[in-house]
Image (spheres, rainbow, N blue to C red):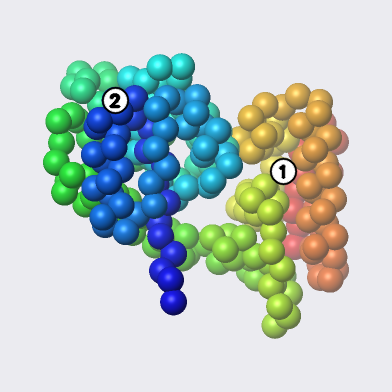
Amino acid sequence: MSIALTTILLAEDEPALGMIIKESLETRNFKVLLCENGEKAFEVYKSHQPEILVLDVMMPKKDGFTLAKEVRAIDDTIPIIFLTAKSQTQDVVEGFTVGGNDYLKKPFSMEELIVRINNLLNRTKLQKASEILKLGNYTFDFPKQTLQFNEDTPIQLTHREAHLLFHLIKNKNQVLDRSLILNKLWGNDDFFNARSMDVFISKLRKKLQRDESIQILNVRGFGYKLIV
């Protein structure tokens, strides 16, 4: 039986260093997606859904801090480690401010990088283990992105459906701000994304309709409210 490898997105514009890090991580049974700039890294992030990001700060086309901001607008849970030659306090502060979880200054040892990667992955697993949520007669497994009615076979949700439902449950019986969630999950709150969100809300209503105690209300001009 093959073992599923943890996928790391590595963004590093120095080719030699990038290959050294990639090959070292692969000897530790990681799958590494190496990108040479932040623009390419963002495309790979969206298409491959890695489990952790290791980002150089100074990169062409898009720097690591800008890339992290864009990722955080979509996903607020994926671990991010910054690699940088910068050592000024304000640079470290900015790294954490934009959503980084850890910060490693060059030059660094591969052993230290691997320890930091494993620590963040273990912390994330513990957090996700606590994110199996009850919703009326449904069980929502956020990490696996599944929704189960009583003892029936779980149904698979899309990435965006799962994140939208997660935010609705976390704000249960309160209004979920439409603009805030559009910016977080869609990247901006323009008209077309708002219509797309309406479609996703309709899909969630259908998937939750077997429990009549659950409603997703449209609060006109404000957002949505999940009532149980």
Q: Earlier in the sequence, mark 2 or mark 1?
A: 2
Q: Is residue 203 visible?
A: yes
Q: Residues within 10 Å of mark 2 (few under 14, many from 20)?
A: few
Query: In this picture, is 126 found above or below 20?
Result: below
The amino acid type, in three-letter code, at marker 2 is: Glu
Horizontal and vertical percent for residue 82?
31, 33
Q: Residues within 10 Å of mark 1 (few under 14, many from 20)?
A: some
- Image quadrant occupied by the C terminus: bottom right
* In this picture, residue 188 sits left or right of residue 23: right
* In this picture, residue 105 sits left or right of residue 143: left
At x 73%, y 80%, the residue is 152
Question: Which residue appears farthest toward the bottom when viewing the image?
Answer: 151
Task: From the viewer's side, name the closer residue of 16 and 6.
Answer: 16
- Image quadrant occupied by the N terminus: bottom left
Task: From the viewer's side, name the closer residue of 16 and 136.
Answer: 16
Cα distance, mark 2 to mark 1? 47 Å
What label sits on residue 175 in the rendered view? Answer: 1
At x 26%, y 41%, the residue is 21
Horizontal and vertical percent for residue 39?
50, 24
Q: What residue is pinned by disc 2?
A: 14
At x 16%, y 49%, the residue is 111
* In this picture, residue 73 sits left or right of residue 125: right
Query: In this picture, is 141 found above or below 107?
Result: below
Q: Report the mark closest to the observer, 2 or 1.
A: 2
Q: Are marks 2 and 1 in contact (CB under 8 Å)?
A: no
Query: In this picture, is 17 found above or below 170?
Result: above
Horizontal and vertical percent for residue 207?
80, 63
The amino acid type, in three-letter code, at marker 1 is: Val
| SS at mark 2 in the image | loop
Horizontal and vertical percent for residue 34?
39, 38
| Res 103 quadrant in image | top left
At x 40%, y 56%, the residue is 6
